[in-house]
Image (spheres, rainbow, N blue to C red):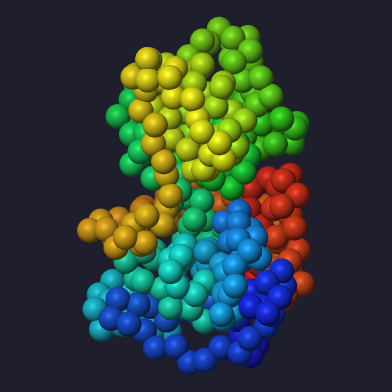
């Protein structure tokens, strides 16, 4: 395979173009990685769409999930060496993983699970980090007992597919997931949900199971649509975490009366602002990797495309945009 990247075309930003890749040299905290597989996420679709309304000066390389082999390390890297197998979600400020080679900060990288192939590993980092930070850094569900209830809105998607088993593995809460189709409901049960309900009328669905409130809500899609139900069913002094932005103002009066905490989760906060706890993401990925190797956690990969090409990248984007994707889609080089 020749050294190349696939990037947004600055001349026609609704297209991808193939560009040659210059030799890369690691900064002090960097790994130089030969990319072996990637996974596509909704953030790829979002930034691709945003680029169509922006005057790009140069091609932009997307991609925020990868697995690969370390070829070189920066002078300050202590925990990785040449030949190590790694996986990571990267950094929004830097060129992405849609390339044969990539530079990534070692502090936000983890050791690839040994028992997974490249594409299975590449399907994990972004969604696992988002799920972990949302559940444990924002909602703190690991401090609760079995009397508490977690509702995951969007259980069959990429983040939900990791949030369900992570909540099951590292907390005692009862896990309820929302879905709509029979296959996605079955997937949520397969991932470890205790109960799966239809998202079209969450409040009524909960009442059928004798529930009025839930203690935690992890909203993974369309908070504008779900907000009336969320504000109704969240317990007094409960916690809500969302990974999606609202398009319209949210009415906070009901949750204010209940003294409810509202959290936002964005996995690139640490790398965007170079927070002092940046290396936590590397630690999380290593914990995830160990859990996979101990067969306590599995990849959410559901579909694999073979070959790094514009055609396959567009095919992966379409699968996500269609809105019916269960789990993750990966591309193995």
In the figure, 219 relative to 326: above or below?
above
Q: Is residue 71 above or below residue 294?
A: below
Q: Which x, y percent locates residue 194?
A: 55, 25
Viewed as shown, does residue 277 lie left or right of 306? left
Indicate whether 300 appears above or below 286: above
Residue situated in front as seen by the camera: 306 or 238:
238
Residue in the picture at 49% in, 75% down: 95
Residue that appears at 33% across and 34% down: 140
Q: Left or right of 270: which side holds 67?
A: right
Front-most of residues 6 and 300:
6
Which quarter shows the N terminus? bottom right
Which residue is found at the position 39% from the left and 36% from the top? Answer: 263
**Count of numbered circles in the view:** 0
> Where residue 289 sits: x, y (%)?
43, 56
Res 179 quadrant in image: top right
The C terminus lies in quadrant: bottom right
Instruction: Please name whichever residue, 292 or 12, is drawn nearer the observer in this view of the structure.
Output: 12
Percent coordinates x, y for residue 318 in the rendering: 75, 58
Position in image of residue 99 (x %, y %): 57, 78
């Amino acid at each position: 395979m020749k050294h190349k990247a696939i990037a947004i075309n600055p001349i026609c930003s609704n297209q991808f173009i193939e560009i040659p890749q210059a030799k890369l040299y690691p900064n002090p905290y960097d790994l130089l990685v030969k990319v072996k597989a990637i996974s596509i996420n909704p953030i790829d679709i979002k930034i691709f769409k945003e680029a169509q309304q922006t005057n790009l000066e140069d091609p932009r390389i997307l991609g925020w999930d990868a697995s690969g082999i370390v070829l070189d390390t920066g002078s300050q890297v202590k925990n990785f060496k040449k030949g190590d197998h790694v996986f990571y979600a990267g950094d929004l400020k830097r060129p992405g993983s849609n390339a044969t080679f990539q530079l990534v900060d070692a502090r936000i990288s983890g050791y690839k699970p040994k028992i997974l192939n490249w594409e299975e590993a590449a399907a994990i980092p972004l969604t696992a980090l988002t799920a972990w930070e949302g559940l444990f850094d924002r909602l703190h569900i690991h401090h609760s007992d079995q009397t508490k209830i977690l509702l995951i809105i969007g259980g069959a998607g990429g983040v939900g597919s990791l949030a369900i088993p992570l909540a099951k593995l590292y907390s005692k809460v009862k896990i309820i997931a929302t879905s709509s189709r029979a296959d996605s409901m079955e997937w949520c049960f397969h991932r470890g949900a205790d109960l799966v309900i239809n998202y079209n009328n969450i409040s009524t669905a909960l009442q059928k199971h004798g529930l009025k409130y839930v203690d935690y809500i992890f909203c993974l899609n369309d908070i504008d649509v779900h907000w009336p139900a969320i504000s109704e069913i969240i317990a007094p002094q409960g916690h809500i975490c969302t990974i999606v932005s609202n398009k319209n103002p949210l009415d906070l009066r009901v949750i204010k009366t209940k003294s409810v905490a509202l959290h936002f989760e964005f996995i690139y906060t640490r790398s965007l602002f170079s927070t002092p706890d940046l290396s936590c993401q590397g630690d999380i990925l290593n914990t995830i990797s160990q859990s996979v190797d101990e067969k306590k956690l599995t990849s959410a990969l559901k579909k694999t495309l073979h070959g790094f090409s514009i055609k396959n990248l567009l095919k992966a984007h379409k699968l996500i945009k269609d809105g019916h994707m269960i789990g993750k889609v990966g591309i193995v080089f």
